Amino acid sequence: MTVRGGALPDASVRRQRGVIASYVNMVVQIVVNLAYVPLLLSTIGQEEYGLYQFVGSIMAYLVSVNGVLSASVGRFYSIYTADGDTRMMENTLAIARRLFWGVSFVAVAIIAALIPAVRFVYSSSFTESQINECVAMLAVLAANMVVTFHNSISLAVATAHECFTFPKVTQLVGLISQPLLILVLTQWYPHALTIALVAFATNAIWSAVQRLYVCHVLQARFTFHGWDRQLVKCILGFSSAVVLVSAADQLFWNSGKLIIGYYLGAGAVAVYGVGSQIYTAYQSAGLTVSGVFFQRVTELIHDNHDMKAVSSLFARVGRVAFVVCMLILGGFVVLGRDFVHLWAGPGYEDAFWIALILMGAMTIEVVQNMGITIMQVLDRYRFRGVVYFSLSVINIVACLVVAPTSGIIGVVVVTALCMIVGNGIVMNWYYAVKLGVDIGLFWREIFSVGAPLVATVASFIVLRAVVPCEYLGWLAFLLFGAMYVVAFVAVFWTVSSNEGERSYVVRLFTHR
């Protein structure tokens, strides 16, 4: 693949740049959220923030379809890119664009049908003005969803060509600019609807920029060469499996908000939303690396059918993801209560337990996220969809039972148990027995890198317990946190890391 002005950098260099850009994005997102959420809560209040979280949970079900089609397009476009089949690359994008318009129309129709349902179901939980604002936000977020659908084609093209830097940079600018605009505008219009409008405007602008990059720099062409029924059948067939997984993910992570909103109102949704901000940041930290290697996994399986090499890559990426997750999860165990108290203020104490329980439960999924990529490339994703959808139905029923008596924490515990069963037991069995992944190698590597790090975290838990105050102030919190990070990194570098990981870190920062 060439671009105007010369060839693209070597694939390994692009992957290194992609990892760096991904982690820069992750750090900025976490920092922005740390500053943004408490400022937003002080500007629009708990009730309005709860409304935004509530509507966002509804929209997440529909936006998940975007991930479904994007995964399908990315899979087949990556295969044709590896084969050098320009005609099929072009036709895949052209057909995908037509499919996306159809899906957009259906999604907008679903939103129109949801509006009277929201009015009816939540009439006793929300005020009339809150329901009217929810309806307006649904309309704005529907438009935002259509933009997101179509931009996912551009992101699929960039991923297939392993060109990560420019999309990540535009996402970075969006991460910074959107909260700033929201904080300025909510000074005059302190409503959840303001957030939705700004999100739509910034998403539209940066989606257009990314589309220009894909068309003019990567020279992607959306040339229609005819309605390839086999290709459409493959895309939709693959999508049907991903639909189950996406629906299950949304049922797991967003049905809780809907159930809590029904029984406990918008204020309780806001508390849950604060906890969800923390565990979402944790999830994104662990998932950052694996997406960079999609094309590499495609080449190993599609070209060489080398499952031994795939198992090795699975273990190596899992080690890196585990170190990042352990740094964050361990730090949250040590200082999480102090952080929530300082960050969100009084009244959000349950957010600590919400975040901690869900972070612990999702750790296996996060460190094994490359398994999802392997299943997608092998077209074996349907099993994961069936398992997750079944567990999500069990999760909803159990949450409805425990919510009236156990409240937010009961809902979170039920969700966490379902995730542990799905990811910790069922999926590991499937990776090992059905896909031929050396899952024993994976867990041996995780144990070897993790044991010294867990011991480090345990020592800091004891150290924090002897500090004679319920909550630390900001200065003490930052100093204690800095001590923890320095000790964790030192133990990783001297005890846990292997030669390959140390060399890779050196190359990342020296470009050698």
Image: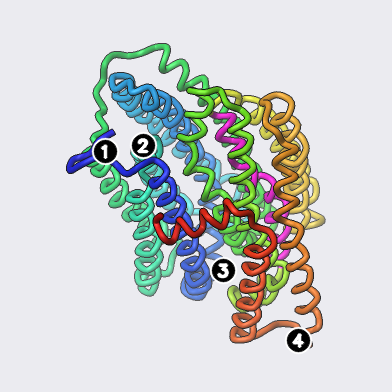
Q: Amino acid at mark 1?
A: Leu
Residues at circles 2 and 4 in contact by the CB criterion of under 8 Å: no
- Is residue 15 shown left or right of residue 38? left
Q: Nearer the viewer, mark 3 or mark 2?
A: 2
Q: State the separation of the CA atoms marked 2 and 1.
A: 8 Å
Residues at circles 3 and 2 in contact by the CB criterion of under 8 Å: no
Q: What span is in magenta? A: 350-376
Mark 1 closeness class: few <14, some 14–19, many ≥20 residues within 10 Å:
some
Q: Is residue 445 above or below residue 187?
A: above
Nearer to me, 248 or 21? 21
Which corner quadrant of the image does residue 345 belong to?
bottom right
Q: Which residue is mark 1?
A: 218
Q: Is residue 149 above or below residue 366?
A: above
Q: State the separation of the CA atoms marked 2 and 4.
A: 53 Å
- Is residue 53 shown left or right of residue 430? left
Q: Residue at x 74, y 68 (%)?
A: 456
Q: Which residue is mark 4?
A: 469
